[in-house]
Image: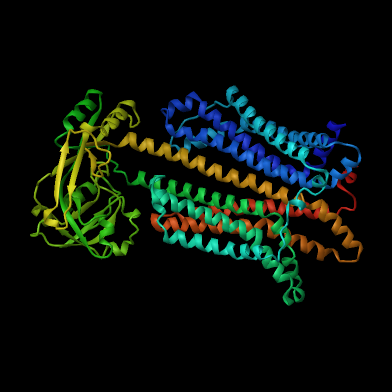
C-alpha cells in the first residue's frame, strides 16, 4: 500500500515537476561530462596535463553541493504541497513513519528518473562537451571518447548519496513533527505580528542596510581583495562586512519591509480606488511567507550575473592579453642570448633576426593630477626607449600603438595602470621629470598597454621618448634586446616549454633594487644578475622570453576557466528557476479551493485570475529583477577599476538569465491557471 501510494502521488505530481526533474538531469549530465573529460587520457595528453583541467573537478563538486541545496528546498515545497493530503492519511490510519516513507519514496522516484535521464544525456553529449572545451582552450582535435565506466558509477553514486541523505533528513523531519504540524507545517512557524514595534524596526532596517552596503561598496577599500585574494588583508574584512550587510538587508526587505509596505498600502484609499493596486497590496503575506526562498533567489541571480560578468571579463581581458603579446617568437638580452640561440639551433631550429631595441633606465617623478597614485610612491624607476627604435619594432609588432612624438612629448606604457584607479584624461595632464636635471620635462600625450617585444623583459613601466632626449640619457644599466623569428620548432613543444620555464629561474632573471628618497636626484638604481630570485621584490624581469609556451598555456587556462564559470552560472540559473516554479505550484491546491469557492459566490473569473497573475509575477520576477540589478551594479562598479568591462557581452548574458526565468514564469503561470480552474481534483481528472 505504501509503495502504491508513493507511485500514485509521483504520477499525479509529475506534470508540475517536469522542469525541476529536467534541471536535476542537466546537473547529472554536466557532472558526468566533467568527470569523463577530466579522466580522458587523450585530452590530458593533447593539453599536456594543463592544471586548468582541475576546474572540471571543482565544477563536479560544485554541482553536487548545489544539488543538495535545490533538492532540500524542493522537498520543502513538496511537503507544503502534500499538506491537504496529510490529514486524509492520518485519518486513514497511517502513522508518521509511514507518511515519511511515502514522501521519501515519492521524491526518490523522481530523482532516480532524473539521474537515469541525466546519465543518458551525459553519454550522448560528452563528445560535444569535450569539443566545446577544447575549442575554448585553443586545441583543434577530435575526440571519440564518450564512455567512462569510472565516471558513470562515480556520478551515479555521488548523486544517489545526495538523494538518499536529503530524503532521509526530510523524512525524519516529518516523522519528528506532531500531528498538528503535519497539517500546518509552515503556518505554525510563527508569522510575526505585522504591527509589532520590532517588525516595524526591521522593516526600516532592511532598506537602510542595503543602502549602507551600496555606500560601502563605493567608499570602503575592498577591491584590493578581489585583485590579490589575500585573506589577511584588511580589505578582506571590508568585503565580508559588505556581503553580510547586503544579505541581511535583502532578507529583512522580503521578510519585513515589503509586507509592511503592502499592509500600509492595503489600508489606503488608493487600493480601493484602483483594483490593480489592491491586488498588488494583498500579496504582502505571500512575500513574508516565502521570504527565505525570495532572498535566496535574489542571491542566486546576483551570483549568476556576477559569475557571468567575471567570465566575460576573463574572456575579454585574457584574450586581449594574448593579442597584446608581441608576435615575436624569441626576445633575448644581447649579452645573454648566445646560450639560448645555441640550444635552439642544436635542436634543429632556425632563427631570423628581426630588430633590436636599446633600453635605458632612470628615476623619474610625475607631476600632475594623482601623480603619487600613478607612481605608488614619491618617485619611480622607468625604462626608456627611443622613438626611432620603437617604430622599427612596430614593423614586426603591429599591435603597438601608432604614435609620432613631437619635442618634449612621451608615450607611457603600463600594464598596471588600469588598477590604479586613475582616469586616462588625468594621466594625460601629467609631466615627467627625469633625475638628470639637464633633461627637460616631457608631457605624456598617449598611453598604451602593449610593450615592445612583450612585457616579460621589462621591470614595469616604459616611456617612449623622442630620439634627441633618448641620446642624452646616460647608458648606466642600459641593455639591448634582440627579437627573432623562430622556425621548425612547434610553439607548444616540450623543448620550448623547458626553455620558457628556465627563463623564470634565478640565473635568467634581472632584479632591481630601488631606493627613493624625497629628492629625485638622490634616487638610486642597482641591477643584480645571477642572484637568487627574490619573490618579494617588485622589480624583476627576464633576460629572455619565449612567446609560444606562455601564450598556449594562457589560452588553455582561460578557455577552461571561462567554460567552467559560464556553465556553472547557466546551470545554477536553470536549476534554481525550477525550484521557484515548484514554490508557486506548491500553493496551487490551496488557491484552487479558494478560487472555486469565490467563483460559486458569483465573483467573475477574470478578476480572480488577475490576482493570481499579479501574485505569481511578483513572487517569481521581483527577486530576479532585484538580483539582476545587484549583479549589474557590482559589475559596473568593478568596471570602474578595470576600465575595460565588456558591457555588451555582460548585458547579453544577463538577458539570457532573465529569459530563462521568464520562460519558467510562463510555464508556472500556465500550469497555475490550468490547475485552479479544475472543477475536480487532479487525481479525479486523470480518471
Q: Position of residue 173 (x, y in %)?
A: 74, 39
Nearer to us in this view, 176 or 511: 176
* Left or right of 665 in this view: 545: left
- Quarter of the C terminus within the rendering: top right
User: Which residue sits at x=54%, y=50%?
Assistant: 303
- Identify the colour scheme used: rainbow
The answer to whether any part of residue 656 appears in the image is no
User: Which residue sits at x=43%, y=32%?
Assistant: 51
* Left or right of 439 in this view: 584: right
**As displayed, is residue 28 above or below residue 461?**
above
Residue at the far front in the pictured view: 197
* Left or right of 93 in this view: 609: left
Q: Position of residue 600 (x, y in %)?
A: 92, 62
Nearer to us in this view, 160 or 462: 160
**Quarter residue 521 falls in:** bottom left
Nearer to us in this view, 435 or 551: 435
**As displayed, is residue 522 above or below residue 31?**
below
Q: Position of residue 281 (x, y in %)?
A: 72, 67
**As displayed, is residue 234 above or below residue 502?**
below
* Left or right of 276 in this view: 251: left
**Quarter residue 552 falls in:** top left
Amino acid at each position: 500500500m505504501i509503495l502504491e501510494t508513493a507511485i500514485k502521488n509521483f504520477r499525479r505530481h509529475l506534470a508540475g515537476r517536469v522542469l525541476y526533474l529536467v534541471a536535476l538531469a542537466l546537473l547529472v549530465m554536466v557532472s558526468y561530462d566533467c568527470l569523463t573529460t577530466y579522466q580522458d587520457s587523450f585530452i590530458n595528453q593533447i593539453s599536456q596535463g594543463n592544471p586548468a583541467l582541475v576546474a572540471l573537478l571543482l565544477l563536479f563538486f560544485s554541482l553536487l553541493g548545489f544539488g543538495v541545496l535545490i533538492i532540500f528546498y524542493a522537498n520543502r515545497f513538496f511537503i507544503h504541497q502534500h499538506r491537504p493530503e496529510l490529514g486524509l492519511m492520518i485519518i486513514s490510519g497511517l502513522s508518521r513513519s509511514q507518511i515519511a516513507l511515502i514522501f521519501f519514496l515519492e521524491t526518490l522516484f523522481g530523482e532516480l528518473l532524473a539521474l537515469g535521464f541525466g546519465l543518458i544525456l551525459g553519454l550522448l553529449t560528452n563528445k560535444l562537451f569535450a569539443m566545446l572545451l577544447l575549442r575554448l582552450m585553443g586545441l583543434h582535435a577530435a575526440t571519440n571518447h564518450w564512455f567512462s565506466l569510472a565516471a558513470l558509477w562515480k556520478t551515479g553514486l555521488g548523486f544517489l548519496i545526495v538523494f538518499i541523505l536529503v530524503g532521509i533528513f526530510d523524512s525524519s523531519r516529518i516523522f519528528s513533527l506532531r500531528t498538528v504540524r503535519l497539517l500546518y507545517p509552515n503556518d505554525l512557524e510563527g508569522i510575526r505580528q505585522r504591527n509589532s514595534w520590532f517588525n516595524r524596526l526591521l522593516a526600516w532596517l532592511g532598506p537602510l542596510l542595503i543602502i549602507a552596503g551600496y555606500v560601502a561598496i563605493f567608499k570602503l577599500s575592498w577591491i584590493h581583495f578581489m585583485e590579490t585574494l589575500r585573506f589577511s588583508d584588511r580589505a578582506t574584512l571590508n568585503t565580508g562586512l559588505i556581503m553580510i550587510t547586503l544579505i541581511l538587508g535583502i532578507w529583512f526587505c522580503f521578510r519585513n519591509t515589503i509586507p509592511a509596505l503592502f499592509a500600509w498600502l492595503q489600508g489606503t484609499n488608493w487600493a480601493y480606488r484602483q483594483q490593480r493596486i489592491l491586488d498588488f497590496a494583498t500579496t504582502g503575506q505571500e512575500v513574508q511567507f516565502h521570504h527565505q526562498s525570495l532572498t535566496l533567489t535574489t542571491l542566486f541571480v546576483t551570483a549568476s550575473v556576477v559569475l557571468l560578468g567575471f567570465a566575460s571579463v576573463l574572456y575579454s581581458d585574457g584574450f586581449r592579453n594574448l593579442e597584446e603579446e608581441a608576435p615575436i617568437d624569441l626576445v633575448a638580452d644581447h649579452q645573454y642570448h648566445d646560450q639560448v640561440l645555441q640550444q635552439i639551433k642544436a635542436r634543429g631550429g632556425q632563427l631570423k633576426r628581426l630588430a633590436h631595441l636599446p633600453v635605458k633606465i632612470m628615476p623619474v617623478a610625475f607631476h600632475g593630477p594623482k601623480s603619487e597614485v600613478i607612481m605608488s610612491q614619491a618617485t619611480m624607476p622607468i625604462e626608456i626607449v627611443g622613438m626611432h627604435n620603437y617604430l622599427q619594432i612596430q614593423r614586426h609588432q603591429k599591435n603597438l600603438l601608432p604614435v609620432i612624438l613631437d619635442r618634449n612629448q612621451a608615450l607611457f606604457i603600463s600594464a598596471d595602470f588600469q588598477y590604479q584607479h586613475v582616469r586616462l584624461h588625468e594621466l594625460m595632464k601629467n609631466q615627467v621629470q627625469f633625475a638628470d636635471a639637464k633633461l627637460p620635462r616631457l608631457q605624456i600625450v598617449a598611453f598604451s598597454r602593449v610593450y615592445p617585444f612583450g612585457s616579460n623583459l621589462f621591470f614595469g613601466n616604459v616611456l617612449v621618448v623622442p630620439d634627441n632626449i633618448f641620446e642624452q640619457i646616460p647608458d648606466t644599466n642600459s641593455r639591448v634586446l634582440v627579437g627573432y623569428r623562430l622556425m621548425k620548432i612547434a610553439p607548444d613543444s616540450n623543448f620550448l616549454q623547458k626553455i620558457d620555464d628556465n627563463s623564470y629561474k634565478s640565473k635568467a632573471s634581472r632584479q632591481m633594487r630601488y631606493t627613493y628618497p624625497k629628492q629625485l636626484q638622490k634616487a638610486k638604481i642597482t641591477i643584480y644578475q645571477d642572484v637568487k630570485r627574490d619573490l618579494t621584490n617588485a622589480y624583476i624581469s627576464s633576460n629572455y622570453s619565449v612567446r609560444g609556451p606562455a601564450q598556449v598555456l594562457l589560452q588553455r587556462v582561460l578557455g577552461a576557466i571561462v567554460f567552467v564559470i559560464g556553465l556553472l552560472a547557466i546551470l545554477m540559473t536553470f536549476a534554481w528557476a525550477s525550484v521557484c516554479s515548484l514554490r508557486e505550484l506548491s500553493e496551487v491546491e490551496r488557491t484552487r479551493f479558494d478560487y472555486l469557492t469565490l467563483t460559486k459566490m458569483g465573483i467573475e473569473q477574470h478578476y480572480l485570475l488577475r490576482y493570481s497573475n499579479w501574485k505569481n509575477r511578483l513572487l517569481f520576477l521581483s527577486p530576479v529583477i532585484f538580483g539582476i540589478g545587484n549583479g549589474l551594479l557590482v559589475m559596473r562598479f568593478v568596471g570602474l577599476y578595470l576600465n575595460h568591462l565588456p558591457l555588451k557581452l555582460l548585458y547579453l548574458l544577463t538577458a539570457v538569465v532573465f529569459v530563462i526565468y521568464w520562460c519558467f514564469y510562463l510555464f508556472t503561470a500556465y500550469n497555475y491557471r490550468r490547475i485552479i480552474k479544475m472543477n475536480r481534483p487532479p487525481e479525479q481528472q486523470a480518471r
